[in-house]
Image (cartoon, rainbow, N blue to C red):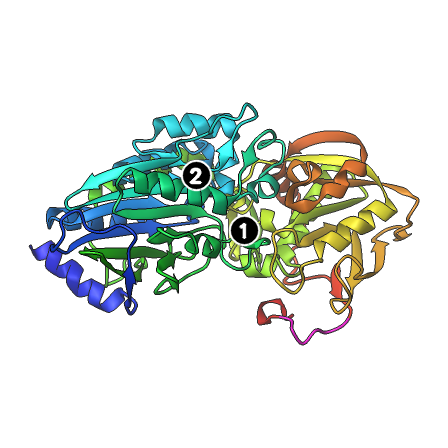
Amino acid sequence: MKKMAVMKKFLLLMFLPVFLIPAISTCGNTNPGEAVTLTVIHINDTHGRTQAEPYISQMAKDLKADGKNVLILDAGDRLHGQTATNLSKGGTMVEIMNEVGYNAMVSGNHDFNFGVDRLIELSGLMDFPLLAANIKDSDGNYLFERYRIFKMNGLTAGVFGIATPETAAKSDPRIVAGLNFENPVETARQMTETLQNAGCTVIIALVHLGDANSTSETRRSDALAAVPGIDLVIDGHSHTRLENGRVIGDTLVTQTGEHAQYIGIAEITLDKRKAAKTARLAAVPVPDSENSLPQDEAVVAKIAEGEAKVESVTSVVVGYTPVLLEGRREIVRTRETNLANLICDSMLYATGADIAFLSGGNIRAGIEAGDITMGHVLTVLPFSNLLVTINMKGSDIREILEHGVSSYPEPAGRHIQVGGLYFEFDPSADPLHRVTNARLTNSGELRPDEVYTAATIEFIAAGGDGYTMMEKGTNMVWYQGDAEAFVRYLETGPVIKAGPEGRVIVSKFSLSMPKATAP
């Protein structure tokens, strides 16, 4: 009772305001006349982070002890991103999720990073289903379970999963070759009909699609909300924080942001044929803060166990930086940074190439001034990409540069970072016609018909992040991994600068340029 009182007091302080939606539900309470509530605890895009898990677990346990109907759902991009889970190829994270008691997860694009076979293997280790109703293999078979039905006190909840078709471009194309991602909206219609026919009184779409920043309307989670019969859409992929959810017709759409900073709590209360829906977020407490949610100590211990297994690797000091190495998502996806320059220089050092380039989305964190550990490196470069060199004409390299700045000033994973050259671009010009000048650092102007050796990562060489022009290259050669090359370069004691060096120059100031991209 004391634990419940503490939790309720904290929730009054930490939960953001509640948004109430009276709506007509397509399927009602299984016990007409009696109000019944389903509480859905959810999270998305943690990218290997675990700080929210002890709170999620204890919150669910306390609610269940009070007789509540509870589901714990994850909207994808969970199994990769931080050192402990990366070194175990997702195994450590599955153990933690099993301890918490998750009920279902949808596959995110980064959950494929260890390969399709490994993701299938991980799904077999899960005590809960990995859902994806719109992914088929080359033989036309569904790759994972499409939906799961949960029978509870007074209601039957059906949960189906939808994965983003952008997985084909935002995962290594070689990994997902042969997979077919069917239309999310049409799949949602089929799943809703199936679950309605199965007698579900609540229908939840657990999706990894993203909001209006996605490239196609049919790929946005909002489009699913127009499908009659879906009560709740739990979304991921775009890292959007919806403090009280978003209402579209009779459907509530929710998303918690990124990196386990917030826990989502959605409630659906059925009373005859009325459905009241609420959404709110709880901020995950800062470690050792005075205000804290109750934690499940068994989950705390499971997380510590996983971290202890890799500490001997992650604690090794591999370099030193006198300044902050900038790798924040919103910065590295919009402009040149000193960390990106350092990584590109390490690629040149490892391969001897003329130029190097990397998409900003492959840099996942920054490094504070001080000692650089192996743990820092593996957090910054978590994808275990091999370096490759490829021979390309100057005209093709210019095409690469154009693609790399085509989304500016909007942040994008494809935003290019370079080594061995510098270039200018005009953001007021049409995309793919912006580069005004490109020169190699040591040999002058980039000549259209001259052949250069370019270093990059195998993800980009395979066409990832939309770099399909890489197929024009020849004589591909493989080298060591990107993290290993970075460490070897740090060991040489390179001069580390405090800021950008003018490698990527905005030639005309744009009034629409976001603050995050300002020098």
> Residue 381 sits in which quadrant?
top right
Question: Which tag is nearer the camera, tag 1 or tag 2?
Answer: 1
Give x and y (percent) for residue 41.
Answer: 28, 51
Give x and y (percent) for residue 33.
Answer: 11, 55
Would you say residue 160 is visible in this rendering?
no
| Residue beneath the point at 32% across and 59% down | 286
Give the Cα separation between the discs numbered 1 and 2: 26 Å
| Residue beneath the point at 36% across and 51% down | 230
Q: Which residues are magenta?
A: 508-513
Would you say residue 431 is visible in this rendering?
yes
Q: Is residue 262 left or right of residue 455?
A: left
Q: Residues within 10 Å of mark 2 (few under 14, many from 20)?
A: many
Callout 2 secondary element: loop
Task: State the residue position of label 1.
Answer: 218
* Label placed on residue 79: 2
Give x and y (percent) for residue 232.
Answer: 34, 53
